[in-house]
Amino acid sequence: MIAAPPRRPVRTARSLLPRPRPRRRVVVAVLGTLLFLALVAATALSLGDEPTTPAALWAALQGHGPENTVYAVLEVRLPRVVLAVVVGAAFGVSGGLSQSVLRNPLASPDVLGISAGASVAVVAVIAIGSLGGPVGVVPVPVAALAGGLAAAALIALLARDGALRGRRILLVGIALSAALTALTQFLLTRIDVYDAQRSAAWLTGSLNARGWGEAVPVVVGVALLLPAALVLAHTNRALLFEDDVVAGWGVRPGAARAALLVIAVLLAALATSAAGPVAFVALVSGQVARRLAAVPDIPPVLAGAAGAALVLVADTVARTALPFQLPVGVLTALVGAPYLLYLLQRRRSTRGTP
C-alpha cells in the first residue's frame, strides 16, 4: 500500500502578505542611529549655563549631588531632551508613513498642510481666550489633534479623485497649507500683543521653557500610536505594489492607506501641539531613513530615530552655540529648505524636464 503524500498547509491570501524582516542594513542603521541619539542626549544633558561633568551628570540623574545641579538636570534639561526626542520621533514616523503611503518623497505633514491645520486650531484657542472667551475649555493637544484631522479630511475630500496618492493630493495639500497659514496670520492680528508674541514664538517651532507639563501628553500619545504604526508596518510595505496585487493578498488598499495616514496625522498633530510646527523634520527624516536603510519602504523605527536625532541636535545647537537661544524650528528650516530644493531638482532631472 502506497502512503499518501503529506498534505501541504493551505496558504491564504493574507499569509502571502510581505512582512518586514530584520534586514541586516536596516538593523545596523537603527542601532547606529540610536547610539548616536544616546550620545547627543548625554551631551545635551551636560551642556547649559554651567556644564556638568559625566560623573556629576550620572549622580544628578539619580538625585544626588549639589541641589542646583540636580534641579538643572532633572527639571530643566531632562524634560526638554525628552520632549525633543519624542517630538522628533513623532514627526519622523509621521513623515515616513506619509511618504511611503503616498509614494512621494515630498509628502510630509508640513508640506501637506497637516501641521498648518493643527497650528490654526491652537492659535484659534489662544485667540478665543484673548478675546474674552472661555480659556482652557479646549486643551492645546486636543485642539491640535482636531485641527490636524480636519485638515487631513479636507485634503482627502478635495483630492478624492487622486486615490490618496500622486501629485494631486500634494498640490491640494500645498494650497490648503497656504490658506491655513493666512488664516493663522489673520488670527494673530485679532489678539493682544502678548498672546500674539507667544503664538508667533510657538509657530516658529520652539522647545524653549518647556517642561514636564508639555512633555507628558506627547509621550503618552506617541507611546500609544507607535505600536500601531509598527503593527501596520507590513501593510505599509505591501502598499508599494499595485492595488490589484495588494487586494490579492487579502488587504484592502484604501482602508490600509487611510489607517496609516490617520496614524501619521495624529503623530504630527501631537508633536505640533507640544513644540509648534517644527519645519521640515518630517520631510527630511523619512528620506534620511530611506537612504540609510537602502530599501524601497521607509522603516518607521529608523525614521523615528532619525527625526529624534535631528530635533535634539538642532535644539542643543540652538540653545548652546549662541549667546541667545534660537527656536529649534529656525535651524531645522535652514537644513530642510535646501533639502526640499534638492528633492525638487532631483525629481525634475529624473523626469527629464527642461
Image (cartoon, rainbow, N blue to C red):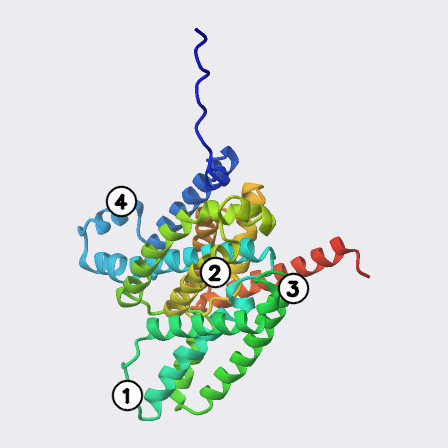
Query: What residue does disc 1 label?
Result: 134
Cα gap from disc 3 to disc 2, whole angstroms: 17 Å
Q: What element carries label 3?
A: helix
* Mark closest to the chain's N terminus, 4 or 3: 4
Query: What residue does disc 3 label?
Result: 167
Q: Is mark 4 on a helix, strand or loop?
A: helix
Q: How crowded is mark 1: few (under 14 residues within 10 Å), some or many (20 or more)?
A: few
Which kind of residue does numbered mark 2 sit on? Ala
- Residue 55 is marked as 4
Cα gap from disc 1 to disc 3, whole angstroms: 41 Å
Query: Nearer the observer, disc 1 or disc 4?
Result: 1
Which kind of residue does numbered mark 3 sit on? Arg
Cα gap from disc 4 to disc 3, whole angstroms: 53 Å
Q: In which quarter of the image is residue 134?
A: bottom left
* Mark closest to the chain's N terminus, 1 or 3: 1
Query: Nearer the observer, disc 4 or disc 3?
Result: 3
Q: How crowded is mark 2: few (under 14 residues within 10 Å), some or many (20 or more)?
A: some
- Which of these two is toward me, 96 or 167? 167
Q: Is residue 11 above or below residue 223?
A: above
* Mark closest to the chain's N terminus, 2 or 1: 1
Q: How crowded is mark 3: few (under 14 residues within 10 Å), some or many (20 or more)?
A: some
* Mark closest to the chain's N terminus, 1 or 4: 4
The reply, left or right, for residue 34 in relation to residue 336 is left
